[in-house]
């Protein structure tokens, strides 16, 4: 027999009663097979004891019994060679399904952000939490996200404020490993095609580039770094300018694979061979990276896992569970055909 419910019982109360995570309770109640029968029985007993039940009436009448978590991005384009945003969508959708949350995709830009503030957007869409990607430090939403009360997981953006966390790769370490690999091949004159000045990951990847050079006691030449804005054609143009000014460069580290493709195009246009004359390393391991130019040597990220981690972090914050301010996901250096030992004549 159920006891009288004298107050609102949440899924968090059930999890606390059993001594398991909120996710485990959610999966057990939704019939997932990865919860043991013993644990499932304990959860059902706690549900009976606490008189817990989702608000089915509210759901049937169009209410919001289930939380809605959105992916907010400014990087969704008609052609997404990068595949990063798609990976985030995939991972976040899977995590929302696991946690019985509604999923929503929202695309923004500077014009939209001027017309509708971040709190207004969340209220209009009835959002419970948001996973944010693609914001630049100069965007109107940048500070509004940090100051808002709504739980947010920020992809590659430093987190500040209540109910905020940063989901990221250790960009400094990953970039350092990439440049150290080039140094290990004998390269000492290494250029860099970086992303955008206003993107936090650009600063972090440049820090890794600098750290690798300084650790190897290689003099830092500030003019060896140019900004390619994470755009293939811009990287093409900047690589040409860099090599025309500094023809002694024997390797280039690019802060994205898209820019690495632009750089390699530029090098071929200049009559240089990759990797015989000059080595190139990218970042991301986008789907096409393994197929072009004998395969691009790159740093592999895992955007699907980042989407999952962001969704889980938001779900935990919604239920008052502690979440680390920064969640570091793994990376991997993938060696392919665009790098080689420095030519003997250099």
Image (cartoon, rainbow, N blue to C red):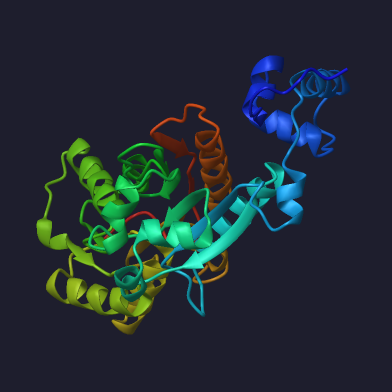
Viewer-nearest residue: 196 or 308: 308
Q: Quadrant of residue 36?
A: top right
Tell whether 28 sits left or right of 270: right
Compare residues 30 and 339 and report the one nearer the observer.
30
Residue 300 in view here: no
| Quadrant where the image shows the N terminus | top right
Residue shown at 48% from the left, 63% from the top: 124
Position of 218 with respect to 265 (left or right) is left
User: How many numbered marks does the figure carry?
Assistant: 0
Instruction: Decide which of 299, 87 is in the foreground and name it.
Output: 87
x and y percentages locating residue 105 in the rendered image: 55, 63
**Residue 137: quarter of image:** bottom left
Q: Residue at x 52, y 71 (%)?
A: 292
Q: Quadrant of the C terminus?
A: bottom left
Is residue 279 placed above or below 98 in the rendered structure? below
Compared across the picture, whether 200 is left or right of 219 comes to right
**Image coords of residue 197 (percent x, y):** 21, 61
In the image, 107 versus 167, the foreground residue is 107
Q: Position of residue 205 (x, y in %)?
A: 29, 50
Residue drawn 21% across and 36% down?
Answer: 215
| Residue 6 visible | yes
Residue 246 drawn at (x, y percent): 15, 68
Task: Name the side, left or right, on which 42 lies relative to 84.
Answer: right
Q: In this rendering, is residue 258 above or below 310?
A: below
Q: Residue at x 55, y 32 (%)?
A: 319
Above or below — where is 71 with respect to 76?
Answer: above
């Amino acid at each position: 027999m159920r006891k009288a419910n004298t107050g609102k019982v949440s899924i968090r109360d059930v999890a606390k009663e059993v001594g398991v995570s909120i996710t485990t309770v959610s999966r057990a109640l939704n019939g997932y097979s990865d919860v043991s029968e013993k644990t499932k029985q304990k959860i059902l007993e706690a549900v009976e004891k606490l008189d817990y039940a989702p608000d089915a009436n509210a759901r049937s009448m169009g209410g919001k019994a289930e939380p809605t978590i959105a992916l907010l991005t400014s990087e969704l384009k008609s052609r997404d060679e990068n595949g990063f945003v798609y990976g985030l969508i995939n991972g976040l959708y899977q995590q929302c399904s696991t946690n019985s949350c509604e999923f929503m995709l929202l695309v923004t830009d500077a014009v939209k952000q001027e017309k509708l503030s971040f709190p207004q957007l969340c209220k209009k869409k009835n959002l419970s939490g948001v996973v944010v990607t693609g914001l630049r430090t100069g965007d109107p939403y940048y500070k509004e996200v940090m100051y808002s009360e709504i739980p947010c997981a920020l992809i590659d953006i430093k987190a500040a404020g209540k109910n905020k966390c940063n989901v990221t790769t250790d960009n400094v370490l990953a970039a350092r490993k990439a440049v150290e690999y080039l140094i290990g091949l004998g390269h000492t004159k290494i250029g860099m095609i970086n992303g955008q000045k206003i993107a936090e990951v650009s600063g972090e990847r440049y820090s890794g580039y600098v750290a690798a050079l300084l650790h190897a006691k290689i003099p830092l030449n500030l003019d060896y770094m140019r900004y390619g804005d994470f755009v293939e054609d811009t990287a093409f143009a900047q690589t040409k300018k860099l090599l025309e000014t500094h023809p002694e460069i024997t390797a280039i580290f690019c802060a994205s694979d898209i820019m690495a493709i632009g750089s390699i195009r530029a090098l071929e246009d200049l009559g240089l061979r990759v990797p015989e004359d000059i080595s190139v390393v990218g970042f991301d391991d986008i789907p096409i990276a393994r197929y072009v130019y004998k395969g691009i040597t790159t740093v592999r990220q895992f955007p699907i896992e980042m989407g999952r981690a962001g969704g889980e972090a938001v779900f935990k914050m919604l239920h008052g569970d502690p979440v680390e301010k920064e969640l570091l996901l793994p990376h991997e250096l993938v060696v392919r055909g665009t790098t080689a030992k420095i030519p003997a004549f250099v």
